[in-house]
Amino acid sequence: MVTVCVIAHVAPLAEGLACSDVVKALLPCETFLKEGGSVPGSCCSGVKSLNSAANTAALRQTVCQCLEAAGKAYDLSPKYAAALPKQCKVTVGYPISYGTDCSK
């Protein structure tokens, strides 16, 4: 957890979006991303907000990198992470997976 906080505070994204913003937006999703179950409305609000904020290819690539780092640091389930966009009715444009090439 300390590692993620350090990453989140020192890794700014393009156009003012930071990894800390990504983590903060998805914090309400933590239980779902670890255990599954129902997705809280506040989680989907964060997912939708983050998706809207990442409105360029460069931002999406960097958010992808932050998501990958946070997912590994928080030991989130890849299965539940992959299901989250559909659960929140959001299209992100790339598969959510630890194997995703964020540069594309």
Image (cartoon, helix red, strand yellow):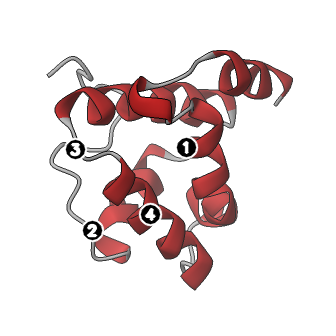
Which one is in front, 28 or 50? 50
In the rendered structure, which amino acid carries the disc numbered 2? Val
How far apart marks 4 and 3 lie (CA) works out to 18 Å
Q: Which mark is residue 22?
A: 1
What residue is disc 2 on?
90
Q: Is residue 75 above or below residue 43?
A: above
Could you tell me if residue 34 is visible in this image?
no
Q: Which mark is residue 96?
A: none
How far apart marks 4 and 2 lie (CA) works out to 10 Å
Image depth: mark 3 or mark 1 in front:
1
Task: Locate the N terminus by quadrant.
Answer: top right
Q: Tag 1: Cα neighbours inside 10 Å, few (<14), some, or many (≥20)? A: many
Q: Residue 95 carries which label?
A: 3
| Residue 12, percent from left and from top | 55, 22
In the rendered structure, which amino acid carries the disc numbered 3? Pro
What residue is disc 4 on?
49
68 on left or right of 19 = left
State the count of labels: 4
How far apart marks 3 and 1 lie (CA) works out to 17 Å
Could you tell me if residue 20 is visible in this image?
yes
| Residue 7, percent from left and from top | 68, 19
> In terms of image quadrants, where is residue 90?
bottom left
- Residue drawn 28% across the image and 70% down it: 86
Q: Label 3's element?
A: loop
Which one is in front, 55 or 6? 55
How far apart marks 2 and 3 lie (CA) works out to 12 Å
Q: Earlier in the sequence, mark 1 or mark 2?
A: 1
Image depth: mark 4 or mark 2 in front:
4
User: Badges 4 and 2: C-beta atoms under 8 Å apart?
Assistant: no
User: Badges 4 and 3: C-beta atoms under 8 Å apart?
Assistant: no
